[in-house]
Image (cartoon, rainbow, N blue to C red):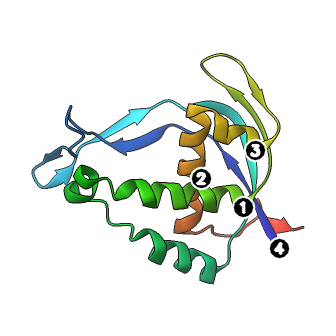
Amino acid sequence: MHTFVYECKERKVPKVDEDFKVIEKDGELVMETFPPLFQGEVVLRVPSYDDRMDITKECAMQINEQEISNGTHFDSMKKLVSFAKKHIKSCDLVKESNGREFKDPKELEYDDDGGNLLLEIGGFLRQGVSLGKSSGAS
């Protein structure tokens, strides 16, 4: 089994209007940048190629305006969070907004920002990890 250390970084997400419709300009998504929600790192068990393809198929990862308007993207988000939780070995995080420490990965799912981090990690894992010096058998 290989592991990877995920470091919290600034996030770029599609900008949405007050009706939660994705904003496009000249046919491209308008992106917003947000600072990291946490400082620290999360140690992840790297999923296999088959696991990544299974979650990609389950989530049908094409988010478009119709999925956002009818709510079907929430099912995909929930599946990504579950996928992330299965692959987290440990965490050592501090929440930026209030200084709360998270040492147990299970605590993340009960915090709003923790849920967002789990979603971010699920999407990261779904895309795949290039094994290198930061990964190792464990």
Kindly identify the amino acid type of the residue bearing the numbered disc 1: His
Residue annotated with mark 4: 1
- Pick the residue in front: 34 or 19: 19
Contact (Cβ within 8 Å) of mark 4 with mark 2? no
Camera-side residue: 63 or 135?
A: 63
Sequence-first disc among 3 and 1:
1
Residue at label 1?
Answer: 87
- Whether tag 4 and tag 3 are in contact, CB under 8 A, the answer is no
Residue 3 on image: x %, y %: 78, 63
The three-letter code of the residue at mark 4 reads Met
User: Would you name the residue on which mark 3 appears?
Assistant: 106
Give the mark toward the camera: 1 or 4. Answer: 1
- Mark 1, Cα crowd under 10 Å, few <14 / some 14-19 / many 20+, is some
Q: Residue at x 41, y 42 (%)?
A: 12
Q: Earlier in the sequence, mark 4 or mark 3?
A: 4
Is 22 located above or below residue 89 in the figure? above
Residue at point 62%, 32% (across, down): 111
Q: How far apart are marks 3 and 1 (CA)?
A: 12 Å
Which of the labelled discs sits on residue 121, or is there none? 2
